[in-house]
Structures are given as structure tokens and as C-alpha cells.
Image (cartoon, helix red, strand yellow):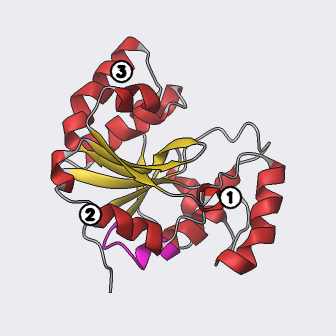
Amino acid sequence: MALYTIPCILFAGGKSSRMGEDKALLPFGGKETLAQFQYERLEELFARVYISAKDASKFGGYDAVVIEDVIAKETEAPTAGFANVFKQLKAENAVFVLSVDTPFVDEKIIQKFLEVPNAQTYDAIIVRTPRGIHPMCGIYSRTLELALFNMLIEGEHKLTKLLENSNVFYIDIEDEDALLNLNTPEDYQRALALMDERL
């Protein structure tokens, strides 16, 4: 039974330019793809999980619910993906977001988001480690929807800019590996090496 009623959005629409191939489609954790691994484990925690991507055809074979990113067809900016999610999920006041390439964000970390006092009073709740903030791991409120669309109009695509001008609660985590991003082939190999001890 799913633990959390807030919808989870798995973002898998990036270019993967540093990886040299689509990282969402790399094998991981005994699954055919990283996206499948992430989707199926998050389904155990959340009542609803969606993949945000430009091409739904990449994610067949495991009943993934894909929100095709019509806004972001011409850009790789995550702000476009966020705006599209709020446009498509009109009934939702907030969403939990996670990048497809952070496979070690586990239930203990996710639980911290649900324990934030007066969470509904914040525009966003974001993970922060000693190296900095992680905008692609957090809860975003619909209070940011207008700001997101305005950023698209202005050509501003940095989530950090959005957060700087918002009411944000930061969850501090010391474990950098928990937020390891699989951006490069070296990152991917490191994640494969860490898998046994972390999963």
C-alpha cells in the first residue's frame, strides 16, 4: 500500500549530453532501465507516480504513466517541465519531484518531506547537502505556477533563481551519495559500485 498521497513526478526529459546516451534508458538495479527502476520503487511509496518526458514511447513495458512535456519540446529547461506538470495536473496543489538520475533518494529522505511542520505554508521544500541545494529533489507548490510561466516568457530557466525568490524550507542532509546524480559515465559506474550497499 502506498504511503504518500502527494503525486510523485519523475523527471526524465533531459538531454543526457554529458552521459553520451539517454541515462533514463541505462540498465540499473536489476531493471532494464534506470527509469523503470525509479518508477517501480517510487510506486511502492506514492499512490500516484508520473514520468515527465518529451517522448512517452521510451517508457513502455512497465505501465508507466507519462506526462508528455508539450511545453518543453523546444527546450531542455526543467522550468518548462514543471509548468507543464501543473498545467496537466490541474487538481494538485503540490507535487513531489525527483530527477530520474538520483537513484539513492530513499524512503528515509522522502519521509523527511512529509514531516516538515506547516509544509503547506512553503512554496517549496528542497534537499540541501554540504555541496549545495538540489532543486530536482523536493516538493513544489502550485503557488509557484505563475512564477514558472513568467520565467518561461522571460527566458529564465534556472530553478535556483526561482527558489531564491520563494518561501523555501530546506531539508539538510549530510550524505552526498544519497543525492548522487548520474550525469557522466563515471557517475554511472560509481552508482553501480554503490548499489549493493545502498539498495
Q: How far is disc 3 from disc 1 in space, using C-alphas? A: 30 Å
Badge 3 crowding class, 10 Å Cα cut-off, few under 14, some 14 to 19, many 20 or more, is some
Q: Are marks 3 and 1 in contact (CB under 8 Å)?
A: no
Which residue extends farthest top? Answer: 154
Q: What residue is disc 2 on?
A: 6
Residue 36 locus on image (x, y percent): 58, 68
Residue 72 locus on image (x, y percent): 46, 32
Q: What residue is disc 1 on?
A: 25
Residue 70 locus on image (x, y percent): 41, 36
**Where is the N terminus found, in terms of image quarters?**
bottom left
Residue 160 vertical placement versus 92 (above, below): above
Residue 180 lies left or right of residue 122; in this view the side is: right
Q: Residue at x 37, y 12 (%)?
A: 154
Which is the main secondary structure of the residues drawn in magenta? loop
Residue 45 found in image quarter: bottom left
Residue 13 vertical placement versus 112 (above, below): above
Total numbered badges shown on the rendered structure: 3
Pick whichever, 71 or 96, lies toward us: 96
Which tag, 3 or 2, sits closer to the chain's start? 2
Pick whichever, 132 or 110, lies toward us: 132
Q: How far is disc 2 from disc 1 in space, using C-alphas? A: 26 Å
Residue 126 vertical placement versus 166 (above, below): below
Q: How far is disc 3 from disc 2 in space, using C-alphas? A: 25 Å
Q: Disc 2 residue type?
A: Ile
Which tag, 2 or 1, sits closer to the chain's start? 2
Residue at disc 1, secondary structure: helix
Q: Residue at x 59, y 41 (%)?
A: 14
Residue at disc 2, secondary structure: loop
- From which residue to which does the magenta span run? 41-48
Which label was assigned to residue 151? 3
